[in-house]
């Protein structure tokens, strides 16, 4: 029979971590156990979890990153399904039931992932945009997933241990879940994206934090991983349409600037703008339907900005920082120095 162990790594989770714990209490059916891994916390996250009757594992005084923390939780777990949940999400009450039932009925499936819901906790524009965009990407992705997701992902314990768990060389939150997913797929395991498996994201995004995360935590290490794999998976936000949109944004910028020297450049820039709107019309209509016209307009502008800095990051990683096949999954010194002490 399937038994579910929920594992939550936390670093100074605060009040939002309390919301996470309260949502776990409402899970139906109840998981076999909830294991909180306190990763160098200097606040009361560990004691808060203990007071709520949750098993707590301490990783010591210094944070070691969510990859090691999740691995420690998996080692201690007694359930045969490991359900990883981030400390800044609330699970829906039916999440454990969905996970348990799916693994029970599909014994050949190695792992499943879910998505964010359409009601992010924080109300500022960037938090709404970022979380809704993430949800849209997952909801429109393929049923057979190409990667894993640590915020809301479950995996059979024996398979997790057999492939070596999360790569402990990731010492801060990064693409450790994506890298695990690539190893699972390479080993022939099947990952499913269950669109009814949903959690609410509690994180508040601001511009500085978003750019640091998207560039240093995601784009650069993901580029490194793609170069290692030798191919770009056509899934999530790496689909062919997304790649064409990225190129179109650069074309739009170049031709618009050239229009100051030759007016024909502005005509061509209109073509690139129309191409971007056509390729992403479903995304922009999604924003329009959920949050109205003004939100959709701002989201369109920020989405183009996202494609711009994402494309720059990929080109920098591929052509300058990690050329050809000599790249390594090890985090380079510049990025580690940038994030030292910031798990």
Image: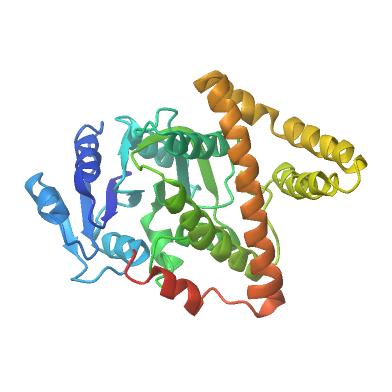
Q: Position of residue 125 (x, y in %)?
A: 45, 34
Asked whether, in this view, residue 165 is left or right of residue 256, the answer is left
**Closest to the observer, 11 or 340:** 340
322 above or below 191? below
Asked whether, in this view, residue 65 is left or right of residue 181, the answer is left
Quadrant assignment, res 144: top right
62 above or below 257? below
What residue lies at 10% left-to-right and 54% top-to-bottom? 47
Q: Position of residue 118 (x, y in %)?
A: 45, 28
**Closest to the observer, 269 or 337:** 269
What residue lies at 18% left-to-right and 71% top-to-bottom? 61
User: Which image quarter is the N terminus in?
Assistant: top left
What residue lies at 49% left-to-right and 40% top-to-bottom? 130
What residue lies at 67% left-to-right and 55% top-to-bottom? 311
User: Which image quarter is the C terminus in?
Assistant: bottom left
203 above or below 208? above
Q: Position of residue 3 (x, y in %)?
A: 29, 45
* Residue 187 seen in the figure: no
Asked whether, in this view, residue 114 is left or right of residue 309, the answer is left
Residue furthest front as drawn: 261
**Closest to the observer, 4 or 194:** 194
322 above or below 298? below
């Amino acid at each position: 029979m399937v038994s579910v162990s929920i594992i939550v790594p936390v670093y100074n989770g605060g009040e939002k971590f309390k919301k996470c714990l309260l949502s776990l209490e409402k899970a139906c059916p109840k998981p076999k156990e909830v294991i909180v891994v306190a990763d160098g916390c200097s606040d009361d996250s560990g004691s808060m979890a203990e007071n709520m009757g949750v098993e707590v594992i301490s990783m010591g005084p210094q944070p070691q990153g969510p990859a090691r923390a999740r691995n420690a939780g998996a080692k201690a777990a007694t359930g045969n399904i490991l359900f990883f949940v981030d400390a800044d999400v609330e699970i829906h009450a039916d999440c454990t039931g969905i996970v348990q039932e799916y693994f029970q009925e599909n014994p050949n499936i190695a792992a499943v992932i879910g998505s964010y819901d359409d009601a992010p906790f924080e109300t500022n524009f960037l938090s709404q945009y970022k979380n809704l965009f993430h949800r849209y990407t997952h909801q429109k992705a393929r049923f057979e997933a190409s990667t894993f997701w640590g915020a809301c992902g479950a995996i059979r314990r024996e398979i997790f241990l057999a492939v070596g768990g999360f790569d402990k060389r990731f010492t801060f939150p990064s693409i450790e879940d994506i890298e695990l997913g690539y190893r699972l797929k390479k080993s022939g395991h099947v990952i499913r994206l269950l669109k009814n498996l949903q959690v609410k994201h509690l994180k508040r995004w601001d511009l500085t934090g978003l750019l640091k995360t998207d560039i240093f935590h995601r784009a650069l290490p993901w580029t490194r991983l793609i170069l290692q794999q030798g191919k770009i998976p056509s899934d999530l936000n790496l689909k062919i349409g997304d790649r064409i949109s990225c190129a179109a944004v650069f074309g739009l910028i170049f031709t618009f600037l050239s229009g100051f020297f030759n007016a024909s450049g502005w005509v061509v820039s209109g073509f690139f703008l129309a191409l971007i709107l056509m390729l992403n019309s479903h995304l922009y209509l999604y924003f329009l339907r959920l949050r109205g016209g003004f939100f959709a307009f701002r989201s369109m502008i920020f989405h183009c900005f996202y494609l711009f800095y994402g494309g720059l990051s990929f080109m920098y990683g591929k052509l300058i920082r990690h050329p050809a096949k000599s790249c390594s999954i090890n985090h380079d010194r510049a990025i580690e120095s940038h994030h030292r002490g910031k798990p």
